Amino acid sequence: MLPRLLFLPLAALIVCSCSVKKLAIGTFADALAEGTAVYASDDDPQLVGQALPFALKTLEGLLESDPRNVDLLLSTCQGFTTYSYGFAELEAAWVEYADYDEFVFQRDRALRLYLRARDYCLRALESVHPGLPEALTRSPGTALQDTSIDDVPSLYWTAASWGATINLGLHRPDLVVDLPSVRALVERLLVLAPDYGEGSVQEAAMLLYALPEAMGGDYEKAVAHRDRAIELHGGRRASTYVAFASTVSVARQDRTQFRTMLQKALAIDTEAAPVHRLANVLGQRRAQQLLDHIDDLFLAPLEDDSEPGA
C-alpha cells in the first residue's frame, strides 16, 4: 500500500509541473523586463552590445517552452528591435563609405534581425487577436479596428520593427510592399495613444511621413510629428533629431537643416536623463558619424552652412 500512496503526490506533481514551469518562465521574464533599465541607463555601448545577444537567446529559449507567452514574445520583439537599431544597423553605418561589401553584409544582418523581431511581435498579436497578422497584411485598413489601449505596446513594437525593416530595405520590393500594414499600425497608434513612449509614436509617424511623396510621404506632417515628439520628451532624446536629419533633411538636400538637427542631438546632456543614457550615447555617435560624412550625403556644400535651420 505504501508505494501506491507515494505515487499519488508524485502524479500530482507531474500533472502540475507544466504550470510550475510556466510560472517560473513568467517570473524570469518579469525579471528580465525589469532589468531593461540596467541596459538603458548604461553609458558603455560595447558592454551592452556584448551582453544583449545572450539575453536575447535566453528569451528565445524560454519561448521554446512557452511559445504563446505574450509578455515573452513582446520582450523578445523589443529586444531584437533595439539590438538591431542600436548595434547591428550602426555597424553597417560605420563601414558604409569605406567597405561596400562589409556594409551590405552588416545591413542584411540588421534586416534579418528586424524581421525576426517583427515575427515575434506578430506572434504576440496573434496570441491575443487570432487571425490579426494575416488580416493586417490582407486588409490593413480594417484589420486593427478591434484593437484597444491594452494592445498599444504590441502595436508599437510591431510598427517599430516592421517600419525599421522597410526603412533599411527600401531596395527590396518584397519588403516595401508591406508599407500599408505599417501605415495602418502607426495610424491606429495615433488614435489610441498618440503620446505613448515619450514621443515614440510621434517619432514613428515622423519616419512614416519622411518617405518620398510617391510612397505617402509629407514634409509638413513629418515636421509636425517631429516637433510633437520633441515636445513630449522635452528634447532629451537624440533619436528624433538624428532620424529626422538622416531621412528628411537628406532627402530634401537641406544641408543646413541637417547640421542643425545633428548639432542639437550632440548638445544633449547624456547624464540628464539616465533612462535615455545608452540611447543618447548611441545617437550621438551616429550624429557625429553623419556629420563626418556630410559631403557624401549632399551634392554640394553651401558657402556657409553653419546657420541653424528648422
Image: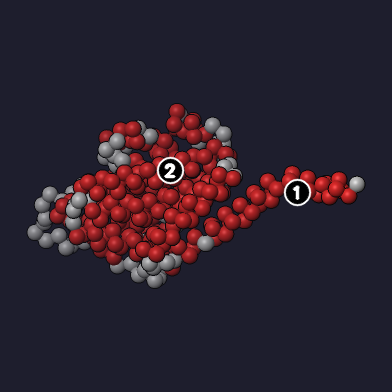
Query: In the image as oriented, which residue stretches furthest toward the left?
Result: 303
Q: Earlier in the sequence, mark 2 or mark 1?
A: 1
Is 189 left, or right, of 2 in this rendering?
left
Question: How far across and down, in percent of the image, does residue 39 sit?
Answer: 45, 63
User: What secondary structure is marked by label 1?
Assistant: helix
Residue 27 is situated, as x and y percent measured from the top left of the image, at 62, 56
Along the line of sight, the residue nearer the viewer: 237 or 168: 168
Q: Residue furthest top?
A: 138
Amino acid type shown at disc 1: Leu
State the residue lying farthest toward the right. 1
Q: Is residue 147 above or below residue 290?
A: above
Q: Is residue 193 visible?
A: no
In the rendering, which numbered label is found on residue 78? none
Residue 93, relative to residue 166: is it above or below? below
Say which residue appears at 34% left-offset and 36% top-offset: 175
The local crowd at label 1, few if under 14, some if 14 to 19, many if 20 or more residues have their Cα within 10 Å, is few
Q: Residues within 10 Å of mark 2 (few under 14, many from 20)?
A: some
Q: Hey, what amino acid is under mark 2?
A: Arg
Q: Position of residue 164 (x, y in %)?
A: 36, 45
The quarter of the picture where the C terminus appears is: bottom left
Label number found at residue 116: 2
Mark 2 vs mark 1: in front = 1
Residue under circle 1?
13
Residue 9 place in picture, x, y as percent: 81, 49
In the structure shown, which secondary structural element does the residue marked by tag 2 occupy? helix
Q: Going 57% across and 42% down the picture, which residue do you hit? A: 67
| Residue 181 seen in render | yes
Which residue is located at x 10 percent, y 52 percent?
Answer: 300
Nearer-the-camera pick, 195 or 262: 262
